[in-house]
Image (cartoon, grey):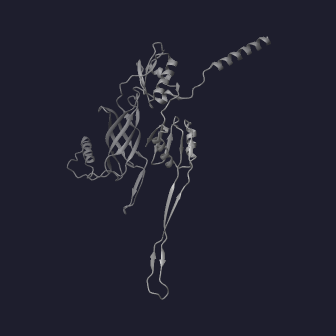
Amino acid sequence: MLRRLTSAFLSALVVISLCLFNAPAAMAGARLKDIVDIEGVRDNQLIGYGLVVGLNGSGDSLRNSPFTRQSLESMLERLGVNSRDQSINTKNIAAVMVTANLPPFATNGSRIDVTISALGDSKSLEGGTLLVTPLLGANGDVFAVAQGSVAIGGFAASGDSGSSVTRNVPTNGRIPNGGLVENELPFRLDDKQQLRLSLRNPDFTTARRISGVINAYLGVGAARATDHATVELTRPPNFPGDMTLLLSEIERLEVEPDQAARIIINETTGIIVMGENVRVSTVAIAQGNLTISVQEQPAVSQPNAFGEGETVVVPQTNVNIAEDMADLAYIEGGVPLRELVNGLNALGVSPRDMISILQALKAAGALQADIEVM
């Protein structure tokens, strides 16, 4: 009995070892849901014009903001108050633009966040309340209404002497869950037989890899890269589920995205970002600084004791020139990004000087990458 158990245990170990040996290695990459957008699954922008009331004297001046006065009169007329041709002098109201994003598949009665931005000359929206405001889509239809207390992330204060202090932007605020969806967008995903996947960073190699991973999971013919930004997905006839289930299955697949060699430069802040595929040809670089300093040291000239004359100031100027000695730094061609950065750091240059060096390398044709200046 013991011999049989031992034999069975060894056989199980052999089977487990073979399974582990033949198991495919996990591919390190990005999930499909993180690198592609699905056709039809998108936000829609909404916009509206409304009034914020309840401000503590920081609203629009009706003399300088005629649209605020007209909106106030129209609102009061709808409420049964006739204020036409009357003297209205209030600074507790402000005209605002209301914006929001309608998420995909938003249902009737769901809540969305809205952003409030002052339109007139109001100083602050702190403490204000937005009145009912219809939010329109690009086609002019009303998809949501917004109302609620405005929350701002700044403040403004001033004194009678004219001194003032402002933090952040007090004329811009948000109403969390302040929008109520009234109309749904007519879009069905479950009955789709075919749709497109849009790459967020278009690339031919990445598109081909995506189609290959999907075909390996679902079968040949399920995905086809039509261009560098689009992969066409077709639901296989034998797939046991609708398009929603299909997307939930493939969005977890991992793909190693490829990218073009690119260097991003922000000359304002001196930030340099290099892609992994940046390469440089064999080149020698020298960088030196020339410093010229001018110092003024005035001297006083005065006559001898009991002598005739007057005391005068005689200017004296000292000019010093200092030039740093710079050796040529040799960078081997075709090196990876790490060695390229080490070679540039060996020069001991600042980020701004490195920007000039990279631009000079590009002009000399020794840098195989695109440079994008922000």
Relative horizontal placement of residue 112, taking residue 335 as reference (left or right): left
Residue 228 x %, y %: 43, 27
Quadrant for the C terminus in the image: top left
Q: In which quarter of the image is residue 181?
A: top left
Q: Nearer the viewer, residue 284 or 275?
A: 284
Residue 246 x %, y %: 47, 20
Q: On screen, 140 above or below 269?
A: above
Q: Which residue is drawn at 49% across and 70% down?
A: 297
Q: Residue at x 28, y 47 (%)?
A: 68
The tally of labels here is: 0
Quadrant for the N terminus in the image: top right
Q: Which residue lies furthest to the bottom in this view?
A: 306
Looking at the image, can residue 249 be seen? no
Q: Which residue lies furthest to the left in this view?
A: 85
Q: On screen, 346 above or below 238?
A: below
Residue 186 x %, y %: 35, 25
Looking at the image, can residue 89 be seen? yes
Q: Residue at x 65, y 20 (%)?
A: 21
Relative horizontal placement of residue 264, taking residue 181 as reference (left or right): right
Residue 313 x %, y %: 45, 76
Q: Residue furthest right?
A: 2
Q: Nearer the viewer, residue 72 or 311?
A: 311
Q: On screen, 264 above or below 20?
A: below
Q: Quadrant of residue 135?
A: top left
Q: Residue at x 34, y 29 (%)?
A: 183
